[in-house]
Image (cartoon, rainbow, N blue to C red):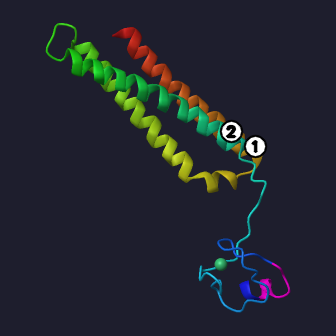
């Protein structure tokens, strides 16, 4: 298919810009880079996927910063009166929320392709579910802060 595509077409090598017109191999004859034929879209409608990504990235970043500050506080106050059990629980909650948000963010990122294959209505519903999940996670963190 690649050879047929290059017949009569002025296509530059993606690496060295050598004109691949009528090339018969699957490597650039000039620089030797392997060549592949792909179908891509310039318009992928990332909108709803991106909204879900931001919904998960926000609590991940927020809780990570708080967990790092709390861990630094624990390290500074570890042998003094300033650190107590509820602070340790709070540090645990922050670390747990960071891990949950981080894993969710990774899953969301790696499943982008299957998300984008859904019809728009399903993408909206999945994004709303992601936002509700992220908000519930953050509400649990805030509830832990208020309680401790
Ligand atoms: Zn080349």
Is 31 on the left or on the right of 77, as rendered?
right
In depth, the one of 101 and 77 nearer the eye is 77
Reading the image, the residue beneath label 2 is 125
Q: State whether residue 3 is above or below residue 102.
A: below
Asked where in the image residue 7 lies, by quadrant, the reply is bottom right
Q: Residues within 10 Å of mark 2 (few under 14, many from 20)?
A: few
Are the residues flagged by discs 2 and 1 in contact, CB closer than 8 Å? yes
Q: Residue furthest right?
A: 8
In depth, the one of 110 and 30 nearer the eye is 30
- Where ligand 1 lies, by image quadrant? bottom right
Looking at the rendered image, the quarter that the C terminus falls into is top left
Q: Is mark 1 within 8 Å of ligand 1?
A: no
Is 4 on the left or on the right of 100, as rendered?
right
User: What residue is drawn where x is 66% and y is 74%?
Assistant: 16
Q: Residues within 10 Å of mark 1 (few under 14, many from 20)?
A: few
In depth, the one of 70 and 25 nearer the eye is 25
Residue 51 is situated, as x and y percent measured from the top left of the image, at 66, 36
Is 99 on the left or on the right of 122, as rendered?
left
Instruction: Label 1, secondary structure: give it.
Output: helix
Reading the image, the residue beneath label 1 is 121
Residue 87 is situated, as x and y percent measured from the top left of the image, at 28, 15
Residue 23 is situated, as x and y percent measured from the top left of the image, at 73, 89
User: What residue is drawn where x is 32% and y is 19%?
Assistant: 90
- Tag count: 2
Residue 77 is situated, as x and y percent measured from the top left of the image, at 21, 14
**Residue 1 in sight:** no
User: What residue is drawn where x is 49% and y is 41%?
Assistant: 104
């Amino acid at each position: 298919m690649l050879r047929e595509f290059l017949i009569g077409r002025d296509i530059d090598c993606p690496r060295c810009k050598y004109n691949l017109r009528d090339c018969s191999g699957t490597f650039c004859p000039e620089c030797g880079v392997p060549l592949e034929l792909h179908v891509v879209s310039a318009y992928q409608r990332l909108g709803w996927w991106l909204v879900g990504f931001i919904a998960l990235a926000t609590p991940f970043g927020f809780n990570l910063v708080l967990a790092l500050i709390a861990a630094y506080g624990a390290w500074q106050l570890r042998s003094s009166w300033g650190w107590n059990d509820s602070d340790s629980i709070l540090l645990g909650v922050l670390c747990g929320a960071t891990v949950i948000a981080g894993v969710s963010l990774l899953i969301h990122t790696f499943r982008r392709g299957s998300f984008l294959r859904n019809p728009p209505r399903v993408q909206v519903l999945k994004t709303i579910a992601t936002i509700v999940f992220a908000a519930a996670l953050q509400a649990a963190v805030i509830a832990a802060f208020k309680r401790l």
